[in-house]
Image: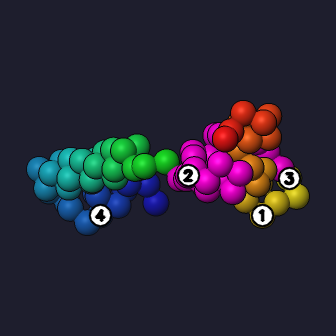
Amino acid sequence: MSLSDHLTKRYPVPEERYVAANVISHEIARRFRAEANAAPPLKACPGCGLELELTAFGAHAGRADGLQVRCRSCRRGGCV
């Protein structure tokens, strides 16, 4: 059942249907903004001891999280 069909069934009066659709669209937009503003997931690198974004780690298909243990800088020898 589409959202339009659901609203028509639940709210037979067009004005009520319009208000309900507006409330739903605002809630979806609020949730989308909240997800977009959420902090990116971090992972600790045992080499440098920093918590870095996941993009700082290379791929490793054999690990559960799919990422290398050490960050790219540590693997290149650039971390202190």
Image disc number at residue 51 = 2
SS category of the residue bearing label 2: strand
What residue do we see at 34% from left, 50% from top? 34
Amino acid type of the residue that numbered disc 4 sits on in the rendered structure: Lys
The magenta segment: 41-60
* Residue 11 picture quarter: bottom left
Q: Position of residue 33 (x, y in %)?
A: 33, 44
Colour scheme:
rainbow
Q: Name the residue under label 1.
A: 64
Mark 4 crowdedness (10 Å alpha carbons): few <14, some 14-19, many ≥20: few
Tell me if I can see residue 32 in this picture: no
Check the picture and name the quadrant holding the C terminus.
top right
Q: Position of residue 4 (x, y in %)?
A: 35, 51
In whole angstroms, how far apart are the C-alphas of marks 3 and 2? Answer: 21 Å
Q: Name the residue under label 3.
A: 61
Q: Where is residue 56 in the image (x, y as percent from the top left)?
A: 65, 40
